[in-house]
């Protein structure tokens, strides 16, 4: 039972320490225990528990959108742009606004895949010029050893006008020295092992040099020349190449146009490139420019065996050609943080050639010999294995752009003719084509002339 009640809190506050603003205080007693009930005290508000801070999630990586190994490499390099400030923050903002389907386009535009084509173009150019050299030597051998080909005795007389007999034309050597010029035009479509869209290459140039004919079976010479190339990659990207070439060559045919023969060449060159690389994806449109150089070494050894039947010369031929390519530093400008920088790279090619050729000896007049010629061969690439082009974007972390091995087999064809004039001049025109390989379709036209003195 309550001991007493009081309508205000004055008494309770003074006697029992009751606080608050109650309107009805009741004091109870239970034997020796006195307790107070404040029936109108407000319900205390519980103190809220502190909310734990969220654990930060890892920063998203651009590598999540990569579709192949090379895209992964460039995406990883772009991860280093996050939080870097400056122009790199501009690139990050553009990348972060892309949809998932647009990242592949961006990675492809930023990657330096274009530089993979430099060696591919050089290898095709060397292959075309080496095969022209083999064809030209074959035509000269047949035209200058026409008597042995046709079986005409050296002093066999022929009846000319007015009943006068004379010695038939012999197109053999009248002098030891000669000077030759070889002009070419090369057009090809390539794609660097399916890693670049098809790009078009147009080249033109020439070689010249002296030749010394030691005897009817053995000749040597040296050459030097220029080759200019223009490459269109599409989308605003292109390449110009001004290259010089030099070397020495020889041919040996101990049978005087019959039987075994061997041709050899050793040389090199230097390429001076002007590269324009367009970098375009949503939010970014830039152009990177560079002027790298590259050295080249070439070696060719070819041989075969010629059979004769009437006016025809035919037989098997085989060759091996090695080309070494070494690119110098690449230092792009114009694309700011997307400029690619590399200390260079090296790669090699070794192409085997196995085929047949057919020549026809036609003495058109007493002073003119014409030798039409057809060549057909199968080529196999043993090298050009995958290699890395290592570099960085805007001086950031290093990454690798890895090439693919090309398709290794192709069909190489050639058709043309050689003309020997008055024992002092010979000229040749050949059309060649590399077919049957989706990585490379190449066509070339060669015209050469040699003067004896």
Image (spheres, rainbow, N blue to C red):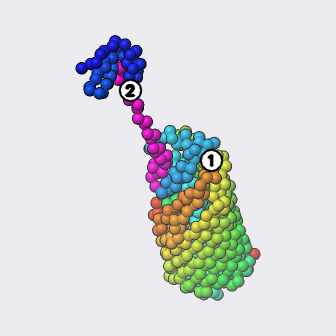
Nearest to the observer: residue 179 or residue 152: 179
Residue, far right? 453
Residue, far left? 1
Q: Which residue is drawn at 54% across and 58% down?
A: 401
Give the quarter of the image for residue 347: bottom right
Q: How far apart are marks 2 and 1 (CA)?
A: 58 Å
On the image, numbered disc 2 is attached to which residue? Answer: 45
Which SS class for mark 1? helix
From the top left corner, tell me how far across and down residue 214 is, in percent: 70, 83
Task: Tell me if 209 is positioned left or right of 402 in this view.
Answer: right
Based on the picture, tell me whether residue 53 belongs to the magenta stretch.
Answer: yes
Nearest to the observer: residue 253 or residue 145: 253
Nearest to the observer: residue 162 or residue 360: 360
From the top left corner, tell me how far across and down residue 298 is, in percent: 63, 71
Give the quarter of the image for residue 327: bottom right
Based on the picture, tell me whether residue 195 belongs to the magenta stretch.
Answer: no
On the image, numbered disc 1 is attached to which residue? Answer: 337
Residue, far front? 32
- The residue segment tinted magenta is 40-68
Circle 1: is it few (<14), some (14-19), or many (20+) Cα within 10 Å? some
From the top left corner, tell me how far across and down residue 29 is, in percent: 28, 23
Image quadrant in which the C terminus is located? bottom right
Q: Residue at x 39, y 20 (%)?
A: 15
Visible residue check, residue 424: no
């Amino acid at each position: 039972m309550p001991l007493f009640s009081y309508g205000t809190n004055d008494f309770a506050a003074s006697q029992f320490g009751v606080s608050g603003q109650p309107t009805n205080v009741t004091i109870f007693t239970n034997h020796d225990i006195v307790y107070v009930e404040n029936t109108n005290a407000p319900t205390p508000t519980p103190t809220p528990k502190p909310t734990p801070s969220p654990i930060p999630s890892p920063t998203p990586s651009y590598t999540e959108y990569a579709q192949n190994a090379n895209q992964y490499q460039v995406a990883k390099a772009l991860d280093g742009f996050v939080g870097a400030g400056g122009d790199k923050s501009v690139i990050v903002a553009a990348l972060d606004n892309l949809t998932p389907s647009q990242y592949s386009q961006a990675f492809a535009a930023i990657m330096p895949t274009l530089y993979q084509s430099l060696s591919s173009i050089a290898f095709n150019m060397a292959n075309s010029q080496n095969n022209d050299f083999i064809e030209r030597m074959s035509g000269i051998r047949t035209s200058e050893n026409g008597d042995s080909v046709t079986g005409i005795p050296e002093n066999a007389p022929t009846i000319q006008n007015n009943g006068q007999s004379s010695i038939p034309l012999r197109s053999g050597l009248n002098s030891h020295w000669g000077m030759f010029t070889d002009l070419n035009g090369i057009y090809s479509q390539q794609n660097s092992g399916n890693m670049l869209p098809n790009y078009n290459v147009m080249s033109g140039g020439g070689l010249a040099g002296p030749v010394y004919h030691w005897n009817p079976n053995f000749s040597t010479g040296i050459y030097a020349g220029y080759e200019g190339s223009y490459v269109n990659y599409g989308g605003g990207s292109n390449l110009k190449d001004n290259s010089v070439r030099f070397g020495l060559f020889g041919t040996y045919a101990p049978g005087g146009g019959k039987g075994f023969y061997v041709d050899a060449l050793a040389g090199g060159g230097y390429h001076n490139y002007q590269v324009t690389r367009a970098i375009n994806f949503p939010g970014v449109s830039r152009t990177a420019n560079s002027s790298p150089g590259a050295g080249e070494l070439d070696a060719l050894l070819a041989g075969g065996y010629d059979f004769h039947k009437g006016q025809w010369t035919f037989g098997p031929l085989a060759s091996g050609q090695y080309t070494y390519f070494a690119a110098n530093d690449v230092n792009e400008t114009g694309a700011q943080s997307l400029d690619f920088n590399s200390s260079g790279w090296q790669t090699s090619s070794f192409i085997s050639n196995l085929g047949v050729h057919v020549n026809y000896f036609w003495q058109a007049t007493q002073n003119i010999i014409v030798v039409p010629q057809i060549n057909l061969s199968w080529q196999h690439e043993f090298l050009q294995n995958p290699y890395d082009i290592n570099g960085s974007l805007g001086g950031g972390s290093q990454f690798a752009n890895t090439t693919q091995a090309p398709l290794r087999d192709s069909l190489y064809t050639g058709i043309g003719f050689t003309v020997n004039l008055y024992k002092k001049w010979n000229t040749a025109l050949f059309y060649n084509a590399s077919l049957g390989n989706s990585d490379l379709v190449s066509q070339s036209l060669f015209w050469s002339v040699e003067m004896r003195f």
